[in-house]
Amino acid sequence: MTALTALTVYLFTLAPTVIHLDSGELAAVQSTLGIAHPTGYPLFTLIGYLFSLLLFPFSKIFALNLLSALFCTVGVYFITSSTKLILDNFQNKEANTNYLLTEKQKAVVSSVLGLMAAFSATFWFQSTSVEVYSLHLAIITTTIFFIFRAYYSNSEKQWLLAAVFLALGFTNHMTTILIIPAFAYVFFLNKGFNKNSFLLIVKMLAIFLPVLAIFYAYLPLRAITEPSLNWGNPVDLERFFRHVSGKQYQVWIFSSLEAAISQLEYFLKILPRELGYIGLVISIGGLFYLFKKSKVVMLFFVISFLSTLLYSANYDIADIDAYFLLAFISLIFFAIGFFVEIIKRTKGKFIYSFFAVPILFIFINFSDVDQSEVKTFEDYTKAMLDQAEENSIIFSYLWDYFISPSYYFQYVEKYRNDVAVIDKELLRRSWYFDQLKNNIPGVIEKINPEIENFLIALEPFEKDENYEPELIEKRYRNLMTQLVAANIEEYNFYVTPELFENEMRRGEFTLPTGYQLVPLELYFKVVPENTGYVEADPTQIKIRFNKIEDPYQKQIRNLVFNMMIYRILYELQFQKNDKAISIYRELKSNFPEIRIPQIVLDRIQAEK
């Protein structure tokens, strides 16, 4: 009942389409049996693919978003079940427990903890759209359940089951490793350091390793078939281990003390709201009482909390919230001690008032989590594709807002798949050229010499050998310029604003001689220098923004705003004063919160 309650609420906050970050890419990978960004997530991909084959009366992206909600519902079920299991065994394992709960009281506490987890901000958010962390939550909570069942039953079969789910966790997300220290603590406490315990470990490994091998075999086997989405192209051992180990992300792990302090400060900043403020108080208070009730349970979750915090605080990435999930779950389990103590002191009265806690979570977190009206990323991506002429190339590195969503619309829904979207940053990776050669062979074949020269310089870098960074950068820049030069006669070429404002202004990316950029609606077009006025009308672009915007929607607003500024200046350059004023009025109406540059205000005033 608790899990179904959570699922019912999840349906109200479910995203109808793609959202920011990896949503589009992961949905495309699941739908097409592709290979996702490191570490590959084979279990997530295979389950999603099978689910996408079911006949639903709605889009595949909505179906896969729904699958994430179902994964999180499984997580809620096993948090509830684990709580009940722990409560059932308080009296059997701890001699200092002097108050036994009734079945009704256990059910209430279990249900309240399940709902607290369900509606904590980051847990809840994973249920709203396609994301690997939703399956991670389902598996990690299942693993916790079987760890405690094995501990309480002292059953070899239960330890083997725990090993199965631990292995499945690693086939989805490598942060499953964060549960290992707590797992080891409970295992050796239960089995001791002896021959039999190590024999059992061997048996667990005999299950664990084949499960890993079976699912990760998907990556090279699928890569051989050259799927459209083939991140890392892990066709050989070197590329396979580079992909599975997430080598390209390791530069951000344990990068500096300053980064760790910053991430820790961020964790402490989001923690109160994550647990609805009062939930944090309950969890901290519960830690003390949980110690009195069961040192084993308390230490299991303390170890889980600390291992998660130590690792995640040392991972210097922006979207770090989901890496703290096991820490948040551990805090929620601390609340067991608080609720049991309250029941003891009140003789079981007012237990239904406990449900006020997860209800408070809903009121506090709903607006931040709710994705049910988010259409911004679909609108922006489709507008970008729609503005491109047939046989066009869009050069960009707007992964979070455009490139990732475009993967879903182009490769799954076949929306404007005549347009080639090239990720400028992925051009730094050798495998990306294999993907491009498969998807847009005519474009890539024209710059084969430049690609070969770049890959020769890049190879020692990817193999952790001595390399020449200046040579890599020089050949990389030349490759980008030649990509335009070799295809400009046959393809319309567009550059998104972040590339113009950053790399081009710094001279890191230059156009071929004789070409310039013209601002259109959402990006710049590469045209010959003698080209006259180019028609465009940014006032016709319609993108739906939410009343409460997340930082990613705000970034899209800034991108659209900046392109309108560039277009106003372009119109004034060609004495199209009426059109410039029309765009300016639209700008003021749609973006009242963004400051218009003084140069634009002065020019508009002069032309009125």
Image: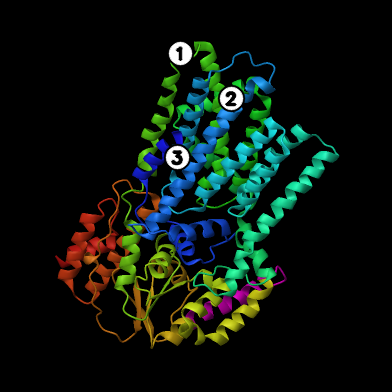
Q: Earlier in the sequence, mark 2 or mark 3?
A: 2
Task: Classify residue 393 as left or right of residue 90.
Answer: left
Task: Classify residue 419 as left or right of residue 535.
Answer: right
Depth check, front residue: 189 or 480: 189
Q: Which residues are magenta?
A: 462-482
Residue assigned mark 3: 121
Q: Earlier in the sequence, mark 1 or mark 2?
A: 2
Helix, strand or loop at label 2? It is helix
On screen, residue 276 above or below 408 = above
Q: Residues within 10 Å of mark 2 (few under 14, many from 20)?
A: many
Residue 192 image offset from top left, x and y in percent: 80, 34
Q: Residue at x 67, y 72 (%)?
A: 236
Q: Say which quarter of the image contains residue 338.
A: top right
Q: Say which quarter of the image contains residue 88.
A: top right
Residue assigned mark 2: 87
Q: CA distance from mark 1 to mark 2?
A: 18 Å
Q: Are marks 1 and 3 in contact (CB under 8 Å)?
A: no
Residue assigned mark 1: 349
Helix, strand or loop at label 3? It is helix
Amino acid under disc 3: Ala
Residue 362 image offset from top left, x and y in percent: 39, 34
Select label 2 or label 3 by which is in front: 2
Q: Residues within 10 Å of mark 3 (few under 14, many from 20)?
A: many
Q: CA distance from mark 2 to mark 3?
A: 26 Å
Instruction: Answer yes or no: is residue 273 visible.
Output: no
- Please state, as top left, top right, bottom left or bottom right, where the N terminus lies in the image: top left
